[in-house]
Image (spheres, helix red, strand yellow):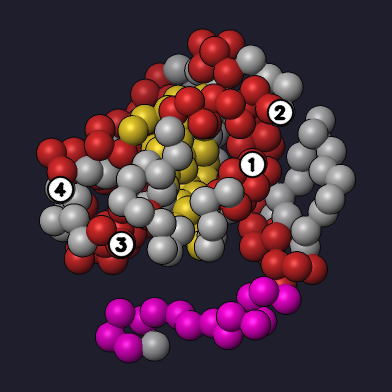
Amino acid sequence: MGPRNERRFDPDVLDSFVASGVSDTPDLRAPTISGLSGAMKESEADLAARHICLFVGRHEVRWEAFRPFFLKHFYAGKPTIYIHSASTRKEMMDRVRDEGLDPHEVIRRGLLTLIPAHDAYLKNATFTPEFMVAFMRLQIIRKRADNHPSHLLCGEMDWFFTNAPGVDSMHEYETALNDLLVEHPQRRSYASTISPGLPASMS
């Protein structure tokens, strides 16, 4: 809809869809993607790249939305790069520890890289699409150099709602990010999580 070709969904329909895909007993040894991301699971093998955006209403839901993606990649030996904003580094490491994993060892093996938003999205307290695309390209190139052609890039984007300089160019960035994933067609995913109503400090 509109000049930006945005998509709009009935919240009741989305709530019903999410509720229908939730599992209370996930298999940690063979984690599956449920909920919103489940709709894309079947076609994953046919995709060279995926760009997924998850909207969560509460901070505590953030990990549950991200968790299946992380565990799926971890148990496949594929690394995850996570840009945290509302979540702290300590919180993310505690979450990994709660899964029965040693976060320091996971990081040492290169299967998890934690980057604060102020070193990525909000470098110099400003969001710049050109910088972020170059930043993401560098992460992809580095993982490829480490013999990891398939990996997960994820970022928290609640800072979007803080009116930080440059946030009005978000649509430009998302479009450029899609082009970047096509430019580097090895299997990888980009998942962003947006939490409306959270204070500045998740994508």
Q: Residue at x 37, y 42 (%)?
A: 85
Q: Any mark on residue 161, and which?
A: 3
Magenta-drawn stretch contains 22: no
Q: Quadrant of the N terminus?
A: bottom left
Q: Which residue is mark 2?
A: 99
| Nearer mark to the viewer, of 4 and 3 | 3
| N-term-proximal mark, 1 vs 3 | 1
Question: Element under label 3?
Answer: helix
Task: Identify which amino acid the numbered label 1 is placed on.
Answer: Arg
How far apart marks 2 and 1 lie (CA) works out to 9 Å
Query: Is 150 positioned to the left or the right of 100 in the image?
Result: left
Where is residue 84 drawn, in percent x and y? 40, 38
**Residue 19 in the image, given as x and y percentages of width and height:** 75, 68
Give the mark nearest the N terminus, 4 or 3: 4
Q: Which residue is mark 4?
A: 126
- Answer with the quarter of the image where residue 164 lies: bottom left
